[in-house]
Image (cartoon, rainbow, N blue to C red):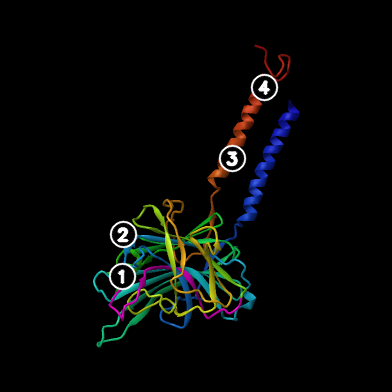
Amino acid sequence: MRANRRSFFFILLTILFYFVVFEARATPDNLQLMPTETHHVAQLNSNQPYVAGYDALTPDLHTMKPVSAVLITVSFPSTDTRHFPSAGWIGGGLFVQDQDSRFGFVDYGFYMMLVIDAASDVFLDVGLHQTRESTAPIQGPTAELLYAYTWRISGITPSTPITLGASWDSDGFVHYSLLAAGFNVTLPPVDVAGLPNCENIHRQFWSGNWKPGTFPFAHYVHYFQFGVVSSEIMANDKWSVKISNPRLMKKPEGEWRQVDTAWSTQGDISYIDWDWMWGGAPYTGVYAQYYQNPLTNPYEVTFFYNGQTLLSGTVLWESKSPKDTSTALTPPADFSQIFRMTETMPFSIQMVLIGIVASGMICLSKQRRKTKPDSPFRKPL
């Protein structure tokens, strides 16, 4: 009896030790975000190379809808930054448009990127451009970077998938969120509606597409894009950027919707309004793996350099699936602090441990019932 009991508790302690050690090794407790002034800005109408996918709501690319939040997952698999230029960097992330409710010629471009530089340091960059379309012959197009914030992420490898999220609230704040390896980081809100000349901004992002103007001057606008931008063309095959599961939420606290259909665009036609586009230059020499070429799962694309250029209008995936409600954004924090990732033991592990303990209690109870009457551990009836 005693030998069986000791054996049981030894097995239980071994399992508990395994979970504790495995979790500590898989998700180090020194993960943190440190604010830095080393910004990596996704520019507009520049010479930055850019390639991306976008949400194609309808085949005619003439449907747009408001959304309250967007999500995307980014990682850098098989990336060796020793081949980067000394000041070079590559960013992968989400690029989404908003509009002014009063002035039709004023728009906004939000970016949220995971960035890796030549030293293999990983960063989170967020920023906002305000654009003004041209009103010929009165004035040409203008743009202003309203804010740019950067955090250096330590304690995680570049190949670790990190989910980036941005959402609006009704008070005019944009909230940022980051999820990685079982950790949850809350990022600070930005009072966008309180910024100078931004009081009329819609409290929402836009998804889908539009075609302003008429032939031969018209072009397509893609409101929600997800792709890659870099300081310059990284003409080597030692890097890749994987982007997966772009999602949108129509209403606050609503359900997440996968981007069911995604097509590609290049930086010379990646318009967010009549005049302005992300990047500004095509990412020549960069190709992609996507659904059925050769990936077997939809909702993901991996960009990499091999000398071939991904054509604009390539169908990255076309699929219909149930709505995804698995990821939730978290409350914001304060700008001035170092953001440490906090971990909660997954619910599945908790249930396993509860089951083990419950099984042990039942086992011991049965063994007690089978104990002989003359046992010193059992009182006679």
Label whose residue precedes the other's in the sequence (2 or 3): 2
Q: Position of residue 132 (x, y in %)?
A: 31, 79
Q: Which residues are magenta?
A: 211-236
Residue ID for mark 1: 99
Label whose residue precedes the other's in the sequence (3 or 4): 3
Label whose residue precedes the other's in the sequence (4 or 2): 2
Q: Residue at x 40, y 74 (%)?
A: 147
Label whose residue precedes the other's in the sequence (2 or 1): 1
Amino acid type at image mark 4? Arg
Residue 375's place in the image compared with 71, above or below, is above
Rounded to the nearest angstrom, the CA distance separating label 2 from label 1 is: 15 Å
Q: Position of residue 308 (x, y in %)?
A: 55, 76
Residue ID for mark 4: 368
Determine the secondary structure under disc 2: loop
Task: Answer whether residue 226 is magenta in the image.
Answer: yes
Horizontally, residue 116 falls left or right of residue 108, namely right
Rounded to the nearest angstrom, the CA distance separating label 4 from label 2 is: 61 Å
Q: Position of residue 320 (x, y in %)?
A: 42, 55
Indicate the quadrant where residue 208 lies: bottom left
